[in-house]
Image (cartoon, helix red, strand yellow):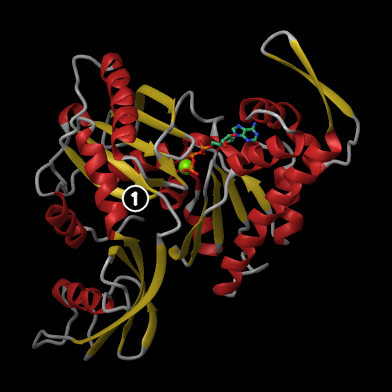
């Protein structure tokens, strides 16, 4: 069922900012108008995870109130949201079933059954599968198949990728959003998958590429090949850690360190060692040694790419992604980071570019938000999947059963 006036709303609940958007799709999801975008400083979130529900709920409520004021008479009732945090992991799964129809043709029911089988992976009692995505189907040992319904055979297998989350964190997130004043959470999408939705072309996904979303306290990684998600990880380090290190190195307040990072961030990748100055509180002059700032900043950025390399190594994709790396997130705005990443990762690297969202194209901190909207547009026309207030946990699992795929 189409949403009222084809309006889609999304929230990106981040460690640095909570952002919200309301978009109206015009025809068949082809054209869209951004009706309102709001971003407020985040609080109550640590490394992508809600740690203080009340504080976060308050912040989300501020975002919703501002959005609602700008989109009157419409009122936001349902939202697409992201989920972040290092608890989100991807695990390979395998399923096998006998093809059930008498004519030996694969039915949708066989596909559903084999995907259910693939969910039998080792997870702890407080972990759950948020979604499971097929990588390839195999009919009678013929591998690499995508669309198998109608094919003739005896045995159907699937190699899949399950996205697992820590249930208490997922439940807390949904509860927090509901308590902030929405009625439904349409879908919960891991941040790097949402960014990929906004930034990657089908060709990039086919050839092999990875999104690196550098946020405030986390760095998200989503790797694609043969059009499939093949790995997902969220690393617990982001651009706010660079700020904190600069604050320690220069013995200044976080706000001053943030200003220094934003103004002189390009020095981090150059060897410009000199004295620089910045005006604090409009009057006070602060002179600092760029050498200290460079050392602190570069060590942290190196750490981020080291962690990314370790993840790529786990799936044998280190230095082996033909379509390279696409950088996004607020942290990717650091001048010079593209060349630095090229050296560290030994891969082609470029910044992402958000298309079709007038006014947001130049700001990569909005890629998750735009990706959530695009996922929402894809869902238009499909049966709506609802998480409502009340018995959140029960509905969370009901939702999970109905989720088939996040990507085209
Ligand atoms: N020009 C810049 N140079 C360096 N860093 C920047 C710049 N502009 C913004 N940032 C950093 O980007 C971060 C915010 O990015 P973003 O909005 O993507 O994070 P988030 O989504 O809130 O966090 P997370 O995804 O980790 O939960 C902040 O740490 C901020 O300092
Ligand atoms: Mg983010």
Q: Position of residue 249 (x, y in %)?
A: 75, 39
Between residue 97 and residue 85, name the one nearer to us: 85
Outermost residue on the top side: it is 283
Between residue 181 and residue 206, name the one nearer to us: 181
Q: Quadrant of residue 342?
A: bottom right
- The residue located at (73%, 8%) in the rendering is 283
- The residue located at (61%, 43%) in the rendering is 241
Residue 355 in view of the camera: no
Instruction: Name above or below for residue 305 compared with residue 350.
Output: below
Outermost residue on the right side: it is 274
Work out which quarter of the rendered image holds the N terminus and state it: top left
Residue 401 in view of the camera: yes
Between residue 22 and residue 243, name the one nearer to us: 243
> Quick check: 9 left or right of 229?
left
Q: Position of residue 292 (x, y in %)?
A: 82, 39
- The residue located at (29%, 53%) in the rendering is 170
Work out which quarter of the rendered image holds the C terminus and state it: bottom left
- The residue located at (86%, 39%) in the rendering is 291
Instruction: Name above or below for residue 128 compared with residue 287.
Output: below
Instruction: Note whether ligand 2 is within 8 Å of mark 1.
Output: no
Instruction: Name above or below for residue 1 compared with residue 401.
Output: above
From the image, tell me which residue sits under label 1: 189
Q: Position of residue 226 (x, y in %)?
A: 47, 67
Between residue 252 and residue 201, name the one nearer to us: 252
Q: Secondary structure at mark 1?
A: strand
Outermost residue on the front side: it is 251
Instruction: Name above or below for residue 354 compared with residue 322.
Output: above
Neighbours of disc 1 within 10 Å: few (<14), some (14-19), many (20+): many
């Amino acid at each position: 069922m189409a949403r009222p006036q084809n309006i889609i709303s999304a929230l990106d609940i981040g460690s640095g900012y909570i952002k919200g958007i309301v978009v109206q799709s015009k025809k068949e999801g082809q054209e869209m108008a951004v009706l309102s975008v709001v971003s407020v400083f985040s609080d109550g979130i640590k490394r992508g995870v809600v740690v203080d529900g009340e504080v976060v709920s308050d912040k989300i409520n501020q975002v919703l109130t501002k959005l609602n004021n700008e989109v009157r008479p419409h009122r936001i009732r349902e939202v697409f949201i992201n989920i972040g945090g290092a608890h989100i992991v991807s695990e390979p799964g395998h399923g096998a079933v006998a093809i059930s129809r008498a004519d030996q043709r694969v039915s949708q029911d066989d596909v559903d059954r084999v995907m259910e089988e693939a969910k039998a992976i080792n997870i702890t009692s407080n972990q759950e599968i948020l979604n499971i995505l097929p990588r390839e189907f195999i009919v009678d040992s013929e591998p690499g198949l995508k669309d198998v319904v109608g094919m003739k055979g005896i045995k159907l297998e699937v190699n899949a990728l399950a996205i697992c989350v820590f249930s208490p964190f997922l439940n807390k997130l949904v509860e927090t959003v509901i308590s902030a004043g929405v009625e439904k959470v349409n879908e919960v999408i891991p941040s790097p998958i949402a960014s990929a939705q906004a930034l990657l072309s089908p060709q990039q996904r086919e050839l092999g590429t990875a999104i690196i979303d550098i946020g405030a306290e986390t760095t998200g990684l989503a790797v694609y090949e043969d059009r499939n998600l093949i790995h997902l990880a969220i690393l617990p380090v982001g651009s706010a850690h660079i700020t904190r290190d600069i604050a320690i190195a220069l013995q200044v307040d976080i706000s001053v360190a943030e200003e220094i990072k934003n103004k002189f961030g390009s020095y981090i990748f150059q060897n410009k060692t000199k004295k620089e100055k910045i005006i604090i509180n409009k009057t006070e002059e602060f002179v600092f040694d760029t050498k200290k700032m460079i050392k602190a900043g570069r060590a942290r950025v190196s750490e981020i790419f080291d962690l990314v390399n370790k993840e790529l190594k786990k799936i044998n994709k280190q230095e082996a992604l033909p379509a390279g790396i696409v950088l996004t997130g607020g942290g990717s705005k650091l001048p010079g980071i593209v060349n630095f990443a090229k050296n560290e990762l030994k891969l082609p690297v470029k910044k992402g570019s958000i298309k079709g969202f007038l006014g947001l194209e130049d700001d990569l901190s909005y890629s998750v938000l735009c990706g959530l909207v695009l996922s929402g547009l894809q869902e238009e026309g499909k049966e709506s999947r609802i998480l409502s207030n009340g018995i959140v946990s029960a509905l969370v699992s009901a939702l999970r059963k109905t989720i088939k795929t996040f990507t085209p």
